[in-house]
Structures are given as structure tokens and as C-alpha cells.
Image (tube, rainbow, N blue to C red):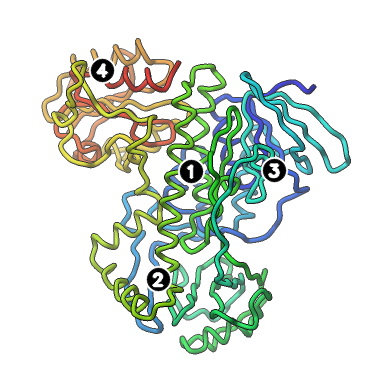
């Protein structure tokens, strides 16, 4: 049997690569296998959402991806040839207020290059043949294209091996859902005389089909549409003439469509695994959920899976993760996938609905997106910035020792509740340091907020207690409203930062002195007043053993 590793990852798509990066960054030994001999080279998913880019920032790869892709901050929504609304991603509170368009093959290559720079390589032409597990780990049988075999011992195994997952099949996990009847068509094609804004997304809702234009850079665009129900072309790959037939009534008949990279058709599906965890084996990405491409959620959801799971596996490798924490991966991500499916179904009814009255009313509702609040709510959902885990066992509402909820004394609104995404803000007027530059994917981050009347001694006392009891798991930062008081000394407990315009306090909903603990995957773990630190103990007491 081969020497053991901490985590074996089966599948080197975006999810598996992201998980390998996150685990390696946390000091976890990892092996990453993929049965394919090389990258597929197909465009596949092309949209990276703001939340995905925030998580890639934690892994140190966001800047490389942004440089390689095409940022788009707006999506123009049209009903026929009439403009209905404009979705404004450029108003999102994020370091990445845009959707990034980049071929999936390019994303995978960039992630693989970073792994190689960190001395982790993808083991190609190597598939999972069998697995057996016991209380202490997993024994995996690997087979290579040349027929050679290897047995490997791992503490955990994660199946990131796609919609036809071998890991899922060996475990016998259910995979329920449906294949839709809509026949989508797609091409990536060069359009040298594009007449629409080249750095924006464009969507057209036609009678019972969509037409979407997405910029890819280098003069190339992705064109997406679908065939009317009952089309004699169903199941056949489209031609450029078929796309011209859709475009011409919209006034785009003069576009020159040249040098297509691919032309494809497919019937979208939505399937969800019954459990994301089976003992020491987990599934992620398409192995856990296959969804329609209508809102560009698939790849992005897989990356969020990876970052959610990585820090929990690290604690598991160290022998410190409670069963409650490991189970929380399924609780959090299964609920997130179900919510995503519901939103996809809503959008599908909007585009393909058979009832003409409901279809008419749905299209009318598009105009409500011109209202700023409605617009923001919509883009928060599709960008995954609005995703939360408020009901997870891996977050801790703030209580004091008597069991009385006390968070309202320090936090006065519904922003940044336990389970919510850590919001974007900057610290230090001169450096303008974004929060996500402080976060580390292997440790929690504790922000000790001063409120309007700083009590440096009380803040240091809280910091001393936190470092003494939980210092192995967290980094500490003191955040002062306005400026750092003259003479404040953190005594080596952590760094001190100024919050000159109250951006941090406002974003975190703080109205007094209090603490906010952020998980390694950049979600709020707990928050509590400065004088009642019991919630910090309760949180770590629940997730650690």
C-alpha cells in the first residue's frame, strides 16, 4: 500500500483544483487525481461570480484570473427588442463588483499552474476504482491508463469527479432530480463587427426562448439560445445559420459570425445528491449537484463547496473536528443547492413558461428590477453574495452565560448576522486595506470593535482571553472607530487598525463595542458584546473536540 496522505481528491475540475489549493495552503497533505489524460480544452462554464472571486482572493489566485478574463459590470435585460431593465453588478459591495468571463479551460489551467508552483501536481490518467472506509480513514484503489494499480490510504476522500461521479456511485448515494425538455444551443464565436457594448452582458427574452450575448475577449462572444418546443432540430448541434435566424429579427443580422470554437446543444438537468457526506468521504461540485446553466451557478457553487469543506477537513486531519462540524458541510451546502435550484426553476418559468398569461406577467416583472432595491436583491442572489448559513450548526448566535441573548447591545441591525457572508469594507485611510486581505483560509479572524467610546483595556482583556483559550485557531485584529487612540499597545496580541469613516462598524452592524468572529471560508461564525465573550467559547466548544 502506498504511503498515506491526508486527503485524496478525485477529480481535477475547478472544484477539485480549488479544494487542493485550499488544503495545501492550510498545510494539509493532498493528492489530486483525474481520470482524463489532459484538460478537455472545451469552453464549458465561463462565468466567475463576485463571491467566487472573493474566495479565490483567499487562495491568492483572484488577480491572475481577473487579468486573464473579461469583467462585466452590467447585464442589459430586454423583452424582444425593448429594454426592460439593467442588472447592476457594478453596485455590489465587493472587491469584485462584476462577473468575470473566462473559459473554464483557462480557469483550470491557471489554478493548476498555481498548484504546480506550490509543488502539487495533478495526477492525470488516474481514476478511482474502489474505496473502503473504516473509522480512521479510507483505503482507495487507483487505476492508471496503462493498467497499473495502486492502493492508497487517506484520512478523507472527496469526490469532485463530476455529474457521473464514481465516488458517488461507489457510496450508493442517491442523486435525484430531472432532465428538462428545453433544448439549449450555444457557440463561442468571433464577431468582428459587434454593435453592442463589448464589456457588458446582454439578454433577450423572446417568445419562448432566450438569446444571450456574453463577451469572452479577443473578439469572441458566447451566444446562447434555445429551440422552440417541438423543433425538428432537437438534439442536433446548431449551425451559425441557426443563430443568424434568431439574431436577425433583433436587428443583428449584419453581425459576421466567424471561426467558432465550438457549437453544441444540450438538455439541461437539475440533480442533487441525498447526502454530501458518508463517513470519511464527501462529494462536492457536480458530483453533488448538477444544475441548469440559466444563472451560471454550477462552477461557482462548486468553488464555494470547496472552501466550505477545506477548513473543516483540516480540523478533521488534526483530530479536532467535531462530528457536528463535519456534518455541517452537508447541512450548509445541501440547503444552498436547494435554494439555487428553486431560483433556477423560477428563471426557467420566466423564459420558457407555457402559460401565456403567466409568461406575460413574468416579463412585466422584469421592469421592477429598475427599482434599486429590487435590482440589488436580484444580483445578490445570482452572485451568491446573499447566500447565508444562519441555521447551521457551525455558527453560534451570541448568548451570555445565563442564556439571554445579548448581541443587540452591541449590534443594532440585521447586517452580518452569524452565518452571513463577511461583508466588504476597508480599513486604514492611507492603505485602504480590504477586509479580505486580512482573512486567512486556515484560521478564524476575530475583529474586536471599539465602538464610539474605546476602552483599550477591555479590548486587550478580551484579546488576551481569546488568544489564551483559542489562539491556535484564530488571528486577532483590534478595529478602532475613527482612529487608533494615542498610546494604545496591543501587547503582541494582534494588529490594530483605524476605521476612519466607520465603514467596518457600519458593515458589521455594530453600534457599540463588540466582537465579530469570521470563519476561514469568510462567513460570520458569531458576534457578541465585548463584555460577554461566552459566545466565543460556545462556538469553539461546538465545532472542536
Q: Is residue 487 visible?
A: no
Q: Which callout, 1 or 4, points at the residue further toward the start of the chain?
A: 1
Q: Is residue 86 left or right of residue 197?
A: left
- For the residues marked 4 and 3, what is the alpha-carbon distance in whole angstroms? 44 Å
User: Which residue was labeled with disc 2?
Assistant: 350
Q: Looking at the rendered structure, which numbered label has been put on residue 166?
A: 3
Give the alpha-carbon distance from disc 2 to disc 1, as whole Å: 27 Å
Q: Which residue appears at 34% of the width and 22% of the height?
A: 539
> Residue 220 in the image: x percent, y percent?
58, 70
Q: SS at mark 4?
A: helix
Q: Earlier in the sequence, mark 4 or mark 3?
A: 3
Position above or below: 496 against 300? above
User: Percent from the top left, x then y, of residue 47?
Assistant: 51, 58
Packing grade of label 2 (10 A; few <14, some 14-19, many >=20) is many
Among numbered discs 2 and 3, the one appearing first in the sequence: 3
Under tag 1, what secondary structure?
helix
The residue indicated by pointer 4 is 534
The quarter of the rendered structure image containing the N terminus is top right
* Badge 1: residue crowd in 10 Å (few <14, some 14–19, many ≥20): many
| Residue that carries the numbered disc 1 in the rendered image | 304
Viewer-proximal residue among 432 and 481: 481
Q: Position of residue 144 (x, y in %)?
A: 82, 39
Query: Mark 1 near mark 4, Cβ–Cβ under 8 Å?
Result: no
Amino acid at each position: 500500500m502506498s504511503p498515506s496522505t491526508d486527503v485524496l481528491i478525485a477529480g481535477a475540475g475547478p472544484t477539485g483544483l480549488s479544494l487542493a489549493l485550499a488544503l495545501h495552503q492550510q498545510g494539509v497533505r493532498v493528492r489530486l487525481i483525474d481520470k482524463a489524460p489532459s484538460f478537455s480544452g472545451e469552453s464549458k462554464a465561463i462565468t466567475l461570480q463576485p463571491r467566487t472571486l472573493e474566495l479565490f482572493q483567499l487562495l491568492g489566485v483572484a488577480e491572475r484570473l481577473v487579468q486573464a478574463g473579461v469583467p462585466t459590470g452590467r447585464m442589459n435585460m430586454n423583452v424582444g427588442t425593448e429594454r426592460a431593465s439593467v442588472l447592476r453588478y457594478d453596485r455590489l459591495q465587493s472587491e469584485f463588483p462584476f462577473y468575470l468571463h473566462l473559459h473554464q479551460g483557462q480557469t483550470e489551467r491557471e489554478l493548476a499552474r498555481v498548484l504546480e508552483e506550490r509543488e502539487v501536481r495533478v495526477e492525470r490518467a488516474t481514476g478511482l476504482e474502489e474505496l473502503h472506509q473504516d473509522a480512521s480513514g479510507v483505503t482507495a484503489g487507483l487505476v492508471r491508463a496503462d493498467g497499473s494499480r495502486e492502493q492508497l490510504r487517506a484520512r478523507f476522500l472527496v469526490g469532485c469527479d463530476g455529474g457521473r461521479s464514481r465516488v458517488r456511485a461507489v457510496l450508493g448515494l442517491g442523486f435525484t432530480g430531472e432532465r428538462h425538455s428545453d433544448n439549449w444551443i450555444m457557440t463561442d464565436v468571433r464577431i468582428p463587427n459587434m454593435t453592442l457594448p463589448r464589456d457588458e452582458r446582454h439578454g433577450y427574452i423572446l417568445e419562448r426562448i432566450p438569446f444571450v450575448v456574453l463577451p469572452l475577449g479577443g473578439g469572441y462572444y458566447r451566444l446562447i439560445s434555445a429551440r422552440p418546443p417541438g423543433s425538428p432540430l432537437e438534439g442536433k448541434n446548431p449551425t451559425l445559420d441557426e443563430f443568424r435566424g434568431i439574431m436577425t429579427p433583433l436587428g443583428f443580422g449584419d453581425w459576421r459570425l466567424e471561426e467558432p470554437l465550438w457549437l453544441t446543444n444540450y438538455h439541461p438537468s437539475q440533480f442533487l445528491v441525498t447526502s454530501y457526506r458518508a463517513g470519511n468521504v464527501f462529494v462536492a461540485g457536480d458530483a453533488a449537484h448538477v444544475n441548469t446553466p440559466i444563472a451560471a451557478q454550477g462552477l461557482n457553487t462548486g468553488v464555494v463547496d470547496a472552501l466550505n469543506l477545506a477548513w473543516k477537513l483540516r480540523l478533521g486531519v488534526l483530530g479536532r473536528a467535531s462530528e457536528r462540524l463535519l456534518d455541517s458541510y452537508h447541512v450548509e451546502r445541501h440547503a444552498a443547492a436547494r435554494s439555487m435550484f428553486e431560483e433556477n426553476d423560477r428563471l426557467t418559468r420566466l423564459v420558457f413558461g407555457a402559460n401565456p398569461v403567466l409568461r406575460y406577467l413574468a416579463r412585466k416583472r422584469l421592469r421592477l428590477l429598475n427599482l434599486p432595491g429590487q435590482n440589488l436583491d436580484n444580483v445578490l442572489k445570482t452572485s451568491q453574495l446573499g447566500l447565508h448559513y444562519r441555521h447551521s450548526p457551525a455558527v453560534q448566535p451570541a448568548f451570555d452565560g445565563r442564556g439571554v441573548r445579548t448581541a443587540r447591545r452591541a449590534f443594532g441591525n440585521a447586517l452580518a448576522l452569524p452565518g452571513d457572508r463577511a461583508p466588504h469594507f476597508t480599513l486604514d485611510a492611507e492603505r485602504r486595506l480590504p477586509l479580505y486581505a486580512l482573512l486567512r483560509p486556515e484560521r478564524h479572524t476575530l475583529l474586536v470593535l471599539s465602538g464610539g467610546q474605546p476602552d483599550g483595556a477591555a479590548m486587550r482583556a478580551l484579546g488576551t482571553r481569546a488568544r489564551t483559550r483559542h489562539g491556535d485557531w484564530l488571528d486577532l485584529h483590534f478595529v478602532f472607530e475613527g482612529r487608533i487612540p494615542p498610546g494604545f499597545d496591543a501587547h503582541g496580541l494582534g494588529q490594530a487598525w483605524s476605521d476612519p469613516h466607520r465603514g467596518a462598524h457600519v458593515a458589521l452592524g455594530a453600534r457599540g463595542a463588540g466582537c465579530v468572529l469570521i470563519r476561514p471560508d469568510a462567513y460570520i461564525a458569531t458576534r457578541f458584546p465585548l463584555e460577554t465573550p461566552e459566545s466565543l467559547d460556545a462556538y469553539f466548544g461546538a465545532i472542536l473536540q
